[in-house]
Amino acid sequence: MTRTERVALLGIGLLLGWIPWLLPGLLILIAAVSCFTLFQRMFTIRNMLNKDP
């Protein structure tokens, strides 16, 4: 999830903040996808460092 998508989702959540479950749900979604991206990048870098030249 790119920064633009995260900001857009957060903006939608803030605009529709009167729905009680929406903002916490979006924050959990953003956190989960950010953790997935973190691990994906870590494994990619590890694989790049372990390649034989």
Image (cartoon, rainbow, N blue to C red):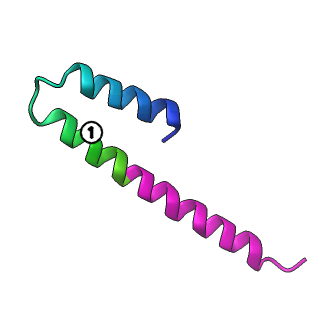
Q: Position of residue 35 (x, y in %)?
A: 42, 58
Residue 20 against residue 35 in the figure, above or below: above
Q: Position of residue 5 (x, y in %)?
A: 45, 32
Q: Position of residue 47 (x, y in %)?
A: 69, 72
Q: Main secondary structure of the magenta part?
A: helix
Say if the magenta span includes residue 1.
no
Residue under circle 1?
26
Q: Which residues are magenta?
A: 33-53
Extreme residue in the right direction: 53
Give the residue displayed 27% in from the left and 48% down from the top: 28
Residue situated in front as seen by the camera: 52 or 26: 26
Say if the magenta span includes residue 47.
yes
Left or right of residue 39, residue 15 in this image:
left
Mark 1: amino acid = Leu
Left or right of residue 23, residue 46 in this image:
right
Residue 19 figure quarter: top left
Residue 42 figure quarter: bottom right
Q: Position of residue 51 (x, y in %)?
A: 79, 77
